[in-house]
Image (spheres, grey):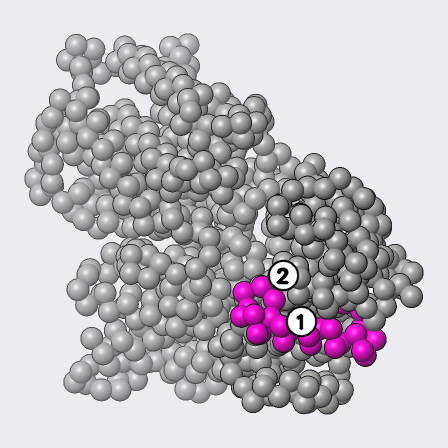
């Protein structure tokens, strides 16, 4: 039980990072982006490539930072991957979504996002192979924190949680202390008023993709670090991330953070009563529950 | 001197269905120009078309003699034109101070001083500056919206029904404040439902109906004009003047 | 020669069954503007429902009620309809995104439950289904031919039904809602109830397709209700032209032919070490078809004839 709680918080932090970008883009561009979770995959694989590259350039970089399995090269690779994934998100918008937006309605964008997801997922599979990959072949033993109740934690998990929380704190400071943050929130609340208040919407869309992509990349790497990297990572995470945005209320950044933790915890706690095979269905049950009890989520506003 | 001229404006959200069929208007510098007319006349659309929020399909808008037809809405501030929408004209989820900082964010080093100056002008807002703007009363919201407009030191302010939804007293306060702004050389273009009050404080008035100019003239003259009374009391359309 | 004909019969049967599902989707998306991200769930509910109601008892599994075939098929449709009704009731009042996400979620949940519940067949799926009239027709080519005829009759029936429905006042209402919800509401109609009706009806048609599919193979397993089927069905509709039933059927045959041909070509000509990736290549292709159509020809190859807006406004 306590193990499920701890695992749930960890998974929750990863889902939160993914959901922040999704909720912003969904709110501003008004479409459910089913390809957002593929940004996590892009991020995870980009970090894998650069991790290997740096390790090859300088062997010292390939050494793990004890007690983690995380290497110096991977730490740098995470930052590069965040930037690259952010840029990919902007490019995908330019190449596909922007054009579909100009041609058709919001629902065409949803269709297009499914197509984009399928293309990205399978191209990653073609490039990197269908079998799972790991950042490190070294086995890092989990630390037994407690025997009764039994609780195992890996150092990498602690790092992931701390890093995810740190990223969220930085984001919070930006949102609550800088005029750029006010502008982001203003755009989320009322795009047309934001525009007449001097905010350039199309530049803001680019920035939102950059941030969303960057956060998704971090989430992808953290997922890879604590699980494994495979081409269907996006397929497996898309529903939980959507569930997180719906729990939090579409458009609410803080809601997405909270929603991520709620979905992570609920999915892991569900394992106490359900066989693990059923866990992919849990996010759907959460979505249904929210739609019945509080359709606009914890912090969402009513809008149709 | 003329500040803003709109000439033969045709505009609407959908290309084939113009809401404004042909409207012309001139706003003199440091004067209050009011646009009135029945519901659906296209008053708000006109102001939005000037602000760049509704595409103008033909006609021109010029500011101090320079053509600015179909501007990018986010660039209007840089041109010295502020626009105060009718409702939802403040960011409810931001604090009052954040609302002002947001519009002042390109003011660089001056930003803090300008913000303090605005707070000095609106002491009621200063007292509540750390509160969410959504918690303000209707009248205070309107003052915050005006303060946000003033933050960019505009030469022209476009206002869409600033008195809508306010108590008569609050409405009076807002309109009087608006009038007072002209003493500093600011040009005001205003849409109002509250015809009598609007005509009392305005210098010039345009009456629109069905997307076209109907009557225009000095506000004082229109206030005493029986035809104007007929439009609003009887709701009938008048032949173009 | 007989091999080719028998393959063509097989191909036409599957394509006709899929056409029925595409017609169901066209009612939802093409005519009403409802996004269904989980076509497989409704298709699958019909398939599982039909086999469970009409099959023979299997050890450890629910069902095997051995109901008469047409009742079993109808039962499968009803099950699809119930699933659609629940999802629709919860989401159709909200922003359209919610329907997209919830239907996608239903499909994931459906596959998960089917895969993990041994009493519903588990990963092995459900067998033990006697194809109707097998005694009379035998198990060979003549049976397949007769079944194709049956499927075609159903397809034509659904097609005619939908054409009449679309021409009816109800159909005009659907398009009115699709194009301008506020206007539709001002006519005094409740858009959410009408959308729910269209959503359930479309899903029931998908359930019928699923039932026929399961009948044809006398078998259904979680492998038959993978998300890719949803994408294929969409691609068929988008290529054919949303809103147009004739286009939907033509799109289905076109995409299904392209899909099977590309699969065959890849397995025939691609080097051995690429074989493993045949699926990935095909998925990329279908993704490109969807995205490409939306970007360059959103109206599809056979677009809907636009007589719509005027009649909706006159009303």
Residue linked to disc 1: B175
Along the line of sight, the residue nearer the viewer: A281 or B29: B29
Along the line of sight, the residue nearer the viewer: C156 or C139: C156
The answer to whether residue B125 is magenta is no
Relative placement, left or right, of C140 versus B154 is left
Dominant secondary-structure state across the stretch colored magenta: helix
Q: Are marks 2 and 1 on the same chain?
A: yes
| Residue B145 higher or lower than A104, as above or below | below
| Residue C154 higher or lower than A4, as above or below | above
The answer to whether residue B179 is magenta is yes
Lower position in the chain sequence, tag 2 or tag 1: 1
Relative placement, left or right, of A33 versus C27 is right
Q: Which residue does the image show at 41% across and 10% down from the upper left?
A: C1
Q: Residue A292 placed where, x, y %?
A: 29, 56
| Residue C284 higher or lower than C25, as above or below | below
Q: Residue B217 placed where, x, y %?
A: 82, 55
The residue stretch that appears in magenta: B163-190
Local SS, label 2 = loop
Residue linked to disc 2: B194
Local SS, label 1 = helix
């Amino acid at each position: 039980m306590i193990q499920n709680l701890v695992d749930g918080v960890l998974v929750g932090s990863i889902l939160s990072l993914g959901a922040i970008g999704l909720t912003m883009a969904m709110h501003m561009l008004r479409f459910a982006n089913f390809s957002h979770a593929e940004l996590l995959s892009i991020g995870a694989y980009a970090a894998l490539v650069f991790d290997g590259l740096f390790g090859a350039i300088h062997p010292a970089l390939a050494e793990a930072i004890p007690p983690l399995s995380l290497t110096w090269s991977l730490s740098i690779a995470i930052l590069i991957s965040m930037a690259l994934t952010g840029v990919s998100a902007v490019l995908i918008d330019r190449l596909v979504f922007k054009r579909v937006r100009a041609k058709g309605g919001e629902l065409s964008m949803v269709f297009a996002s499914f197509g984009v997801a399928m293309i990205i997922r399978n191209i990653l599979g073609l490039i990197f192979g269908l079998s799972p990959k790991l950042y490190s072949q070294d086995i890092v033993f989990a630390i037994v924190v407690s025997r009764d109740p039994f609780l195992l934690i890996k150092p990498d998990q602690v790092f992931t949680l701390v890093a995810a929380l740190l990223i969220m704190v930085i984001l919070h400071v930006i949102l609550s202390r800088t005029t750029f943050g006010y502008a982001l929130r203003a755009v989320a609340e009322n795009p047309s008023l934001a525009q007449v208040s001097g905010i350039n919407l199309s530049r803001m869309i680019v920035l939102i993709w950059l941030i969303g992509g960057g956060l998704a990349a971090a989430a992808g790497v953290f997922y890879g670090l604590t699980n494994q990297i495979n081409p269907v990572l996006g397929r497996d995470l898309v529903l939980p991330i959507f569930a997180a945005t719906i729990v939090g209320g579409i458009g609410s950044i803080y809601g997405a953070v909270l929603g991520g933790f709620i979905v992570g915890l609920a999915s892991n706690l569900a394992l106490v009563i359900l066989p693990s095979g059923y866990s992919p269905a849990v996010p759907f049950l959460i979505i249904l529950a929210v739609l019945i009890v509080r359709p606009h989520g914890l912090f969402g506003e009513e809008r149709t | 001197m003329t500040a803003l001229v709109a000439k033969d404006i045709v505009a609407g959200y959908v290309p084939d269905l113009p809401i404004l069929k042909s409207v012309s208007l001139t706003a003199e510098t440091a004067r209050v120009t009011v646009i009135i007319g029945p519901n659906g006349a296209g008053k708000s659309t006109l102001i939005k078309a000037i602000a760049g929020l509704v595409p103008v399909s033909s006609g021109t808008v010029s500011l101090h003699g320079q053509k600015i037809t179909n501007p990018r809405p986010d660039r209007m501030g840089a041109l010295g034109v502020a626009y105060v929408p009718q409702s939802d004209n403040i960011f409810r989820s931001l604090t009052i101070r954040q609302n002002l900082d947001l519009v002042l964010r390109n003011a660089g080093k001056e930003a803090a001083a300008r913000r303090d100056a605005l707070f000095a002008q609106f002491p009621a807002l200063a007292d509540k500056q750390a509160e969410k703007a959504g918690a303000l009363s209707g009248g205070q919201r309107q003052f915050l919206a005006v303060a946000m407009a003033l933050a960019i030191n505009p030469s022209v302010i476009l206002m869409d029904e600033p008195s809508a939804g306010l108590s008569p007293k609050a409405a009076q306060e807002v309109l009087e404040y608006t009038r007072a702004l002209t003493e500093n050389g600011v040009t005001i273009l205003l849409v109002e439902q509250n015809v009598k009050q609007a005509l009392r404080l305005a210098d010039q008035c345009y009456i629109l109906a069905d997307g076209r100019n109907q009557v225009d003239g000095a506000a004082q003259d229109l206030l005493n004009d029986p035809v104007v009374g007929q439009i609003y009391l009887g709701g009938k359309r008048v032949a173009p003047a | 020669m007989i091999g080719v004909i028998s393959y063509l019969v097989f191909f036409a049967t599957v394509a006709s069954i899929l056409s029925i599902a595409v017609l169901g989707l066209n009612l939802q998306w093409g005519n009403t503007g409802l996004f269904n991200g989980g076509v497989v769930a409704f298709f699958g509910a019909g398939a599982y429902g039909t086999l469970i109601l009409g099959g023979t008892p299997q050890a450890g599994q629910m069902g095997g009620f051995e109901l008469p075939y047409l009742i079993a098929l109808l039962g499968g449709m009803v099950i699809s309809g119930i699933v659609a009704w629940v999802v629709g009731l919860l989401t159709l009042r909200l922003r359209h995104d919610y329907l997209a996400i919830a239907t996608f979620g239903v499909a994931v949940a459906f596959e998960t439950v089917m895969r993990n519940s041994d009493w519903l067949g588990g990963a092995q799926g459900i067998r033990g289904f006697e194809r109707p009239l097998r005694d009379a027709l035998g198990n060979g080519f003549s049976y397949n031919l007769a079944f194709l005829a049956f499927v075609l009759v159903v397809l034509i029936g659904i097609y005619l039904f939908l054409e009449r429905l679309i021409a009816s006042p109800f159909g005009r209402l659907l398009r009115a809602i699709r194009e301008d919800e506020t206007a539709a509401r001002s006519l005094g109609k409740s858009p959410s109830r009408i959308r729910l009706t269209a959503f359930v009806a479309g899903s029931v048609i998908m359930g019928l397709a699923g039932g026929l599919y399961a009948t044809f193979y006398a078998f259904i397993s979680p492998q038959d209700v993978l998300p890719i089927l949803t994408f294929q069905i969409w691609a068929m509709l988008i290529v054919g032209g949303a809103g147009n039933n004739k286009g939907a059927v033509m799109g289905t045959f076109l995409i299904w032919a392209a899909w099977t041909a590309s699969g065959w070509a890849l397995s025939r000509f691609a080097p051995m070490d690429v074989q493993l990736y045949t699926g990935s290549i095909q998925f990329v292709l279908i993704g490109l078809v969807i995205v490409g159509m939306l970007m360059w020809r959103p109206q599809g190859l056979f677009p809907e004839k636009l007589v719509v807006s005027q009649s909706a406004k006159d009303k």
